């Protein structure tokens, strides 16, 4: 009788242990494993502008109040491209009357939206960060820093210590300055990445490059130009920085989605599209289609593990909403196969859970 009782107790304890292990494994799939770095990445972000006219979102449409933020913010690093300065006042540096240039000026109170949405790194290496000159970009850096968000570009390098690993994010753009490393000088870019790889376990490269607009969805194996200006050879650049030691490459600037690939074990997104671009950007297809990409990379070797995505569609004011039709996923698969001969395997997030 004692033997049977002992056997029953042993089996019961063993069953409990197994259930605990399985439960913990399930939790691991939802959050970030200790062995992984999880990066949420989005593209061009402009929160509203007070120039040339005032167009700022009402409270319900502000970024931090959107349901999608629950997915966006659940990561070790939350990254986006800040398309314009965060500044009150100032004088624009562009002649917008030509119709070929746009100048944005996000009021400083909207910096709260980035912090509350979970961002901890934002690129300033782009063609709008200096729309209001030195005053504008210095205000941007100051406002981001106050909110605990790392500006990314040139000498401004985002640095993190996560799960015992040293991580940095570098920012590149065709016109080099103290706010951007050069996208056009590929050999110099390789040297820069290699030098950071000697000091950091994980190096992430952000770049703003390539042509813009609906006709720029397809990747070009060569130099791209926009309004006569060189916007770089983005395929050569991205693969070259991986060769030099980059573990993840995130592109933005064309304002449309482009294909993705895994090159030598490293994930490259060539354009993340428009994320939140209030009022002043085109909200027609394909400019209004994007996704939040959540990328898992190994902390052991920096290699790509998996990617999940939340497909988005902007409304007429440029506010992103969950897209039940999953257009972004279909588009990313099509472009990746046709342009890069790579078939991505996106884990599509629970759309209904994040719709409201």
Image (cartoon, rainbow, N blue to C red):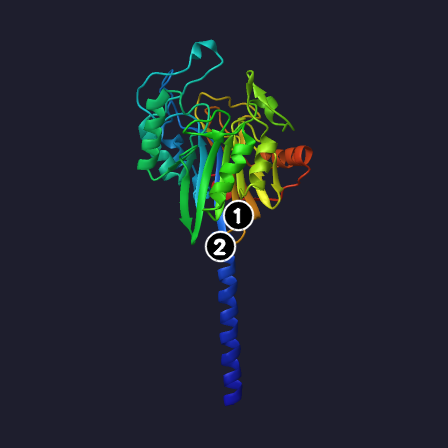
Q: Quadrant of residue 129?
A: top left
Q: Is residue 134 above or below residue 268?
A: above
Q: Residue furthest bottom?
A: 1
Decide which of 283, 39 is in the foreground and name it. Answer: 39
Number of marks in the rendered image: 2
Query: Relative to residue 53, is residue 36 depicted above or below?
Result: below
> Which element is circle 1 on?
strand
Residue at image coords 58%, 41%: 243
Residue under the point 50% across and 89% down = 2
Q: Tell me the SS state at disc 2.
A: loop
**Residue 156 vs residue 345, the one in the foreground:** 156
Numbered badge on residue 208: none
The residue closer to the viewer here, 320 or 296, is 296
**Residue 167: percent from left, percent from top:** 45, 46
Q: In the drawing, what numbered circle is on residue 296?
A: 1
Q: Is residue 133 left or right of residue 17?
A: left
Camera-nearest residue between 196 and 253: 196
Which residue, as the protein is rendered here, is positioned at the far top?
97
Is residue 258 visible in the rendered image? The answer is no
* Residue 33, disc: 2
Provide residue 321's location: percent of width, then percent of height: 49, 33
Mark nearer the N terminus (2 vs 1): 2
Label 2 crowd bin: few (<14), some (14–19), many (20+), radius 10 Å = some
Residue 178 occupies quadrant: top left
- Relative horizontal placement of residue 247, taking residue 107 as reference (left or right): right
Q: Are marks 2 and 1 in contact (CB under 8 Å)?
A: yes
Quadrant of image for the C terminus = top left
| 32 w.r.t. 228: above or below | below
Q: Would you say residue 273 is visible in this rendering?
A: yes
Question: What crowding class fits label 1: few (fewer than 14 Cα within 10 Å), some (14-19), or many (20 or more)?
Answer: many
At 66% from the left and 41% from the top, the residue drawn is: 343
Which x, y percent locates residue 255? 53, 26
């Amino acid at each position: 009788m004692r033997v049977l009782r002992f056997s029953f107790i042993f089996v019961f304890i063993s069953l409990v242990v197994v259930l605990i292990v399985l439960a913990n494994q399930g939790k691991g799939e939802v959050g970030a494993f200790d062995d992984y770095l999880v990066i949420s990445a989005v593209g061009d972000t402009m929160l509203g502008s007070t120039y040339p006219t005032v167009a700022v979102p009402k409270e319900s449409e502000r970024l931090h109040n959107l349901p999608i933020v629950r997915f966006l913010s659940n990561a070790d690093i939350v990254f986006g491209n800040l398309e314009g300065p965060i500044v009150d006042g100032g004088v624009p540096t562009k002649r917008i009357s030509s119709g070929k240039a746009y100048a944005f000026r996000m009021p400083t109170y909207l910096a709260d939206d980035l912090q509350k949405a979970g961002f901890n790194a934002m690129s300033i290496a782009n063609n709008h960060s200096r729309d209001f000159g030195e005053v504008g970009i210095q205000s941007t850096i100051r406002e981001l820093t106050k909110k605990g968000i790392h500006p990314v570009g040139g000498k401004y390098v985002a640095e993190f210590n996560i799960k015992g690993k040293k991580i940095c994010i570098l920012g590149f753009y065709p016109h080099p300055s103290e706010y951007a490393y050069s996208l056009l000088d590929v050999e110099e870019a390789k040297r820069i990445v290699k030098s950071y790889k000697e000091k950091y376990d994980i190096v992430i490269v952000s770049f703003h490059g390539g042509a813009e607009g609906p006709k720029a969805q397809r990747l070009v194996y060569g130099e791209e130009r926009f309004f006569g200006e060189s916007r770089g050879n983005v395929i050569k650049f991205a693969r070259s920085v991986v060769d030099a030691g980059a573990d993840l490459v995130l592109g933005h600037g064309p304002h449309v989605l482009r294909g993705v690939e895994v090159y030598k074990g490293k994930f490259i997104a060539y354009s993340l599209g428009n994320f939140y671009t209030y009022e002043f950007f085109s909200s027609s297809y394909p400019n209004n289609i994007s996704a939040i990409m959540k990328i898992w990379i190994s902390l052991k070797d920096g290699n790509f593990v998996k990617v999940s995505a939340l497909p988005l569609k902007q409304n007429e004011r440029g506010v992103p909403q969950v897209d039940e039709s999953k257009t972004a996923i279909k588009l990313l698969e099509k472009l990746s196969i046709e342009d890069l001969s790579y078939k991505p395997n996106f884990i599509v997030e629970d759309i209904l859970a994040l719709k409201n």
